[in-house]
Image: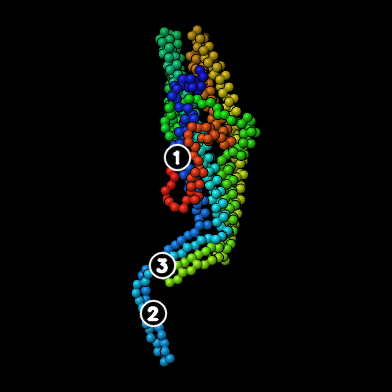
Amino acid sequence: MVPLALLVASSPAAAQSLDEALATAYQTNPNLSAAEASLRRTDEGVSQALAGWRPSADLSVGGGYAADLAGTSSGSQQSTLSSSEGAVVSFDFRVRQPIYNFITPATVEQAKSNVKAERARLTATEQDVLLHATTAYLDVLRNQAILEETTRQQQQLERDLATAQHRFQLGELRNSDVAQSEASVARARSQRTVAEGNLATARAAYVQVIGRPPETLTLPPEPQGLPASQEEAVARSADAPAVIAANYARARAASDGIDISNGQQLPQFAIQGDAGAANQSILAVMTVPLARGGALDAQVRASKQLQMQREQEREAQLRQAQQEAVQAWQSYQSAKSNVDSSKAQLKSAQIAADGIRREASLGLRTVTDVLIAQQQVLDADVSLITAQRDTLLGAYQLLAADGGLTAQGLGLDVPYYNPKVHYDQARTQLWGRDVDQGK
């Protein structure tokens, strides 16, 4: 038996490959679609920031009832009172064009940094989704193979039980031998039930990530471009992971926040025009903040603390990425070693089981010996299946650690999401409320 690898040879031509499953997840996974929508929302922040350079216009219209009272006096110290009253309508039209301020440039840069951070977060989400999809795919393969082996084990033990019962009737075996066979069959049935439950759980996880039930799956090859050593894996992790790029961009956005807070204490220059019912004016306006009860200085201090926080988060994420690269490399190497040892274990267990069965037929071995040998074969089978699954998953985890587990990096046959398209549209759009629905 070659457990998991047999699924490749026995699968029909119409089987679903891992790349096809990943392509489906890339196009339909709601977590990835939500991350794309979040990026498009962040893109709008650049347009909002650029509005600080654009003109604004307001129209105020009022209407109501008014009464004016006017008093007059004469040299004789007598006074008279006159009044006028009636409906009143007023309006004021104001246009303001910013000339320069120290807030908008930093706000625009901060918005751009936020976009970079969100793009990196989208890439991280994409890798997370594809890794979960890979895990779900391999888990279905593993649990399907284990179910096949436990079913085969149950069928073999049921045949052994029938043989034991026949030999008991002939007086060749004792009642305790039959009882041992019955217990082994019950155990095999329990193991099969557990395997069926594990497969059902794996299939449900597959649907949750990929969006449709698994068809006939095939064992994928190892991905290309894996690091050749642990040192190379760590070196790649320092540059490629999207979470590091996201933390770098967030740190830059926090630095821009300091400039914004400082800019709020500096003069702002604008041209302002007003037109009302009785007068019109156009003025050059300079606004200088004088006092805000200490709020502005507090904002500067808070922005500096946020920058320090982001810098430390970036350093922590870099260390975590390096640790995850080491862990992925070691897991991959350990799984590869387990495949070799499990193959040797399975071969030895099969040879031993065959020999014990022959000896038992000659009366040289007990029923217990046969049952133990049969269980050892199943255990070795399951170990090999699990090691093969762990090796493949470890390879894809290594790929994720250096940033290569993306639709484009894997060369999936799907249209790739291009975040620049919406960004270019949003940053210059002045009118309209319709939104991009994504891919």
Q: Residue at x 59, y 60 (%)?
A: 297
Seen in the picture, residue 153 relative to 171 is either above or below; the reply is below
Check disc 2 and report the residue beneath it.
69
Q: Are marks 1 and 3 in contact (CB under 8 Å)?
A: no
The residue positioned farthest toward the left in the image shown: 86
Seen in the picture, residue 270 relative to 395 is either above or below; the reply is below
Q: Residue at x 56, y 62 (%)?
A: 268
Check disc 3 and report the residue beneath it.
91
Please tell me which residue lies in front, 12 or 380. 12
Are there few (<14), some (14-19), or many (20+) residues within 10 Å of tag 3? few
Going by the numbered disc 2, the residue's amino acid type is Leu
Residue 95 appears in the rendering = yes
- Among the 4 quarters of the image, the one containing residue 73: bottom left
Q: Position of residue 20 (x, y in %)?
A: 47, 30
The answer to which of marks 2 and 1 sits earlier in the sequence is 2
Q: Is residue 140 left or right of residue 101?
A: left
Going by the numbered disc 3, the residue's amino acid type is Phe
Q: Is residue 333 left or right of residue 370?
A: right
Gap in angstroms between the C-alphas marked 2 and 1: 68 Å
**Mark 1, mark 3: which one is toward the viewer?**
3
Q: Residue at x 56, y 35 (%)?
A: 404
Q: Position of residue 293 (x, y in %)?
A: 55, 64
